[in-house]
Amino acid sequence: MPAEIVTTVHGTFGEILQGYTFGAHGFEHFLFTAPVEELKSQARLCPHDGTAKKRLGITPSDRAKALSAFELLSAELGYGATDCTIEIDSNIPVAKGYASSTADILATAQLCIRSRHPETPEPVVHALALSVARQLEYGDYLLHPGVAACAQRSHRLLAAYRTDLRWTLVGVDEGGWVRTEEFHQESPEDLGKARVYAELFAQLDTALRADDYAAAAEVASRSAELHNDRLPKKSLEDLRRIQRDQGALGVCIAHSGTLAGLIFSRHQPDHDLRVRECRSELESCGYSTETFTLKEAQR
């Protein structure tokens, strides 16, 4: 086994836009990721001490999907048993909408390949990692270092963007958790909404290609409002009011999580002051806040 290899995948602050379109193959679900710099999952292999053979393990022990990803990919590639423990070091909160499970799965799947064949070309690693991820869950495409549009139910990449939005997200957690698998099993679809989502997809694609940080935030707000009948955000009314008070650009939510937040951009004059005052106003309403930086692939 080569020298220690660590694979890293970033989490997200919900999604900029999530919805579905209707076409020749019926309803097709999509999302635009909102990866953030501050959250990440890292995976490494630690050989067991001593001579006694032990089974492959994982820590924390509750990361069953990540362990399955390593085992499935090992079997598909014909790798022998691995006498190691997969160590996941993640600061991504679970069941909140930060894509923690997807990040763990993709980090571990990449580790499976890199630990055996470190020189494997990146596109091959990504394709193999996604091949097992889609067997385990619906999820985001997190292997592009910036915003990406993907087919949510297959992790298939639709578009990868290089942007200069310079977003700061001031987030609140409404508490509790969302069981993502159960949530997605009940997914009512509507032709009228599908037409609206198709328009928003086109608008956001145009905004991202033009680095229109304000227009992209407006689409995020529209997505939050459209989704509020599906998974209501108790904070949405407060966020909209504070958006007006502090000159925030829009609202971003986790469409299958407990997160919601306001969007600012470092392109805005007095960005730092706006963010500070936004946090102060949210906290005066009883919310605990965190700030996140949108992770962007540069042009």
Image (cartoon, rainbow, N blue to C red):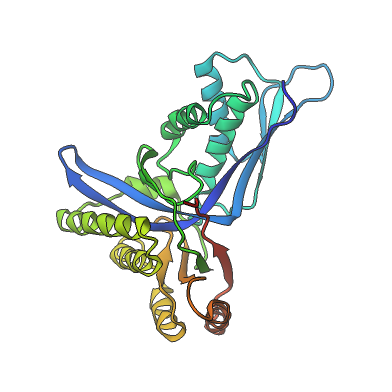
Q: Horizontal placement of 247 versus 280: left or right?
A: left
Q: Nearer the viewer, residue 212 or 138?
A: 212
If the image is split into quadrants, where does the N terminus sit?
A: top right
Residue most extreme to the front:
299
Name the residue: 41% across, 55% down.
256
Q: Position of residue 280 (x, y in %)?
A: 57, 82
Q: Is residue 72 above or below residue 80?
A: below
Name the residue: 67% across, 29% down.
57
Q: Horizontal placement of 283 versus 49: left or right?
A: left
Q: Horizontal placement of 80 versus 134: left or right?
A: right
Specify the quadrant of the image occupied by residue 56.
Answer: top right
Q: Is residue 20 visible?
A: yes
Q: Position of residue 52 (x, y in %)?
A: 80, 17
Q: Is residue 61 above or below residue 30?
A: above
Q: Nearer the viewer, residue 63 or 20?
A: 20
Name the residue: 42% across, 43% down.
139
Q: Horizontal placement of 48 versus 210: left or right?
A: right
Q: Position of residue 164 (x, y in %)?
A: 46, 60
Q: Is residue 95 visible?
A: no
Q: Is residue 92 above or below residue 56?
A: below
